[in-house]
Image (cartoon, rainbow, N blue to C red):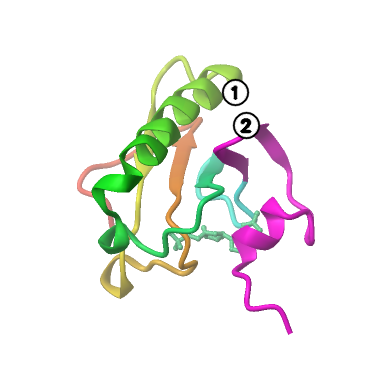
């Protein structure tokens, strides 16, 4: 049995996803349970389980995710703005142990988040 997490399986094309962007360092695909009209997950190809596992060696990888998120937002027409979220650990409701940005757009968001 494969020990890969679900995002690694999407990266490796073992399960399908609606991919909207990909380069050598990351992939972006539509969330299967969208919380907004646009809900894309931007995922590094390198496995980092949670934000608590990040080290200074991951600086370029994480910086790249934000540059990719901006490119995806532009591609998907989110000129009015968007929200980027990273859940870390159980209190934030992190389900998939592979660091990722949620890119949410297409509606207004409240603050503070629920
Ligand atoms: P987290 O709670 O870990 O920050 O977010 C994980 C996200 O991954 C959730 O929003 C969930 O809907 C999404 N997700 C879980 N499994 C799959 C899947 O198989 N395909 C896609 N496209 N999204 C998934």
- Residue 44 rendering spot, x and y as whole percentages: 51, 46
Residue located at (59% from left, 69% from top): 5
Q: Which residue is mark 2?
A: 23
Question: Compared to 10, does 91 lie above or below?
Answer: below
Which of the 4 image quadrants contains residue 72?
Answer: top right
Quadrant of ligand 1: it is: bottom right
Tell me whether the residue at label 1 lies in contact with that at label 2, contact meaning CB atoms closer than 8 angstroms: no
The residue sitting at 29% across, 55% down in the picture is: 54
Q: Which disc is residue 65 wearing? A: none
Looking at the image, residue 36 sits to the left or right of residue 51; the answer is right
Q: Foreground: 40 or 105?
A: 40
Question: Spatial distance from mark 1 to mark 2, Cα to Cα?
Answer: 17 Å
Q: Residue reaching furthest bottom? A: 1
Tell me if residue 50 is in the magenta stretch: no
Residue pointed to by mark 1: 76
Front one among 6 and 56: 56
Quarter of the image for residue 102 reads top left
10 Å crowding of disc 2: few (<14), some (14-19), many (20+): few
- Return the residue found at the far left: 112
Q: Which residues are magenta?
A: 1-29
Please tell me whether residue 23 belongs to the stretch shown in magenta.
Answer: yes
| Residue 96 against residue 45 in the figure, above or below | below
């Amino acid at each position: 049995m494969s020990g890969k997490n679900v995002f690694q399986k999407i990266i490796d094309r073992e399960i399908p996803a609606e991919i909207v962007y990909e380069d050598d360092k990351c992939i972006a695909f539509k969330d299967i349970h969208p919380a907004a009209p646009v809900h894309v997950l931007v995922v590094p190809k390198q496995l980092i389980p949670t934000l608590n596992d990040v080290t200074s060696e991951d600086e370029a990888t994480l910086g790249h995710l934000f540059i990719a998120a901006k490119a995806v937002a532009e591609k998907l027409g989110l000129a009015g703005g968007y929200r980027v979220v990273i859940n870390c650990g159980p209190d934030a409701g992190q389900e998939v142990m592979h660091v990722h940005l949620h890119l949410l757009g297409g509606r207004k968001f409240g603050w503070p988040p629920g």
